[in-house]
Image (tube, rainbow, N blue to C red):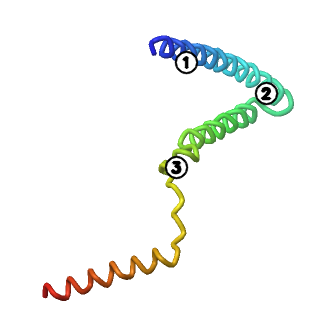
Amino acid sequence: MLTGLKLSLAQGLRRAAFSAGAGLCFLVGAGFLTVAGWIYLAETTSAQTAGLVIGAIWFAAGFVLLGLANLRPAAARRPHHAAHPPRPQPDGFGIAQAFLYGLEAGQGSARRK
């Protein structure tokens, strides 16, 4: 039991470390792409237009990420119910028996009044 916990913890830490590394790479890449976009837009248009375009792109990306952060997975939207065994199909005997039980219950309640 303890070895399973250690293995699970090690896998979680490994996943967190690789995720942090990937996040750092994404940030560095986004910085270089922003600078490259700025240089291109500043050469083809004015510096003011370049700043406006790059700012709008980052602002839109922030809204998209904010929207994605508020989404719940499909499994979390539906409450999890345990699988119920299928209901047996009633046969003629079961229906007749249920009818007789209901009839007796009705007669018993009529007698108590």
Quadrant holding the C terminus: bottom left
| Mark 3 touches mark 2? (CB < 8 Å) | no
**Residue under numbered circle 2:** 37
Residue drawn at the location 73% of the way across and 20% of the way down: 29
Left/right placement of residue 22 relative to residue 101 reads: right
**Residue under numbered circle 3:** 77
Q: Nearer the viewer, mark 2 or mark 1?
A: 1
Q: Residues within 10 Å of mark 1 (few under 14, many from 20)?
A: few
Q: Position of residue 18 (x, y in %)?
A: 64, 16
Q: CA distance from mark 3 to mark 2?
A: 40 Å
* 20 w.r.t. 62: above or below: above
Q: Inspect the image, locate mark 2, and give the three-letter code of the amino acid beneath it.
A: Gly
Quadrant holding the N terminus: top left
For the residue pair 15 and 59, the one nearer the viewer reads as 15
For the residue pair 80 and 45, the one nearer the viewer reads as 80
For the residue pair 17 and 6, the one nearer the viewer reads as 6
Left/right placement of residue 82 relative to residue 105 reads: right
Secondary structure of the residue carrying numbered label 3:
helix
**Residue under numbered circle 1:** 12
Secondary structure of the residue carrying numbered label 1:
helix
* 56 w.r.t. 10: above or below: below
Residue drawn at the location 79% of the way across and 27% of the way down: 37
Q: Position of residue 99 (x, y in %)?
A: 39, 82
Q: Residues within 10 Å of mark 3 (few under 14, many from 20)?
A: few
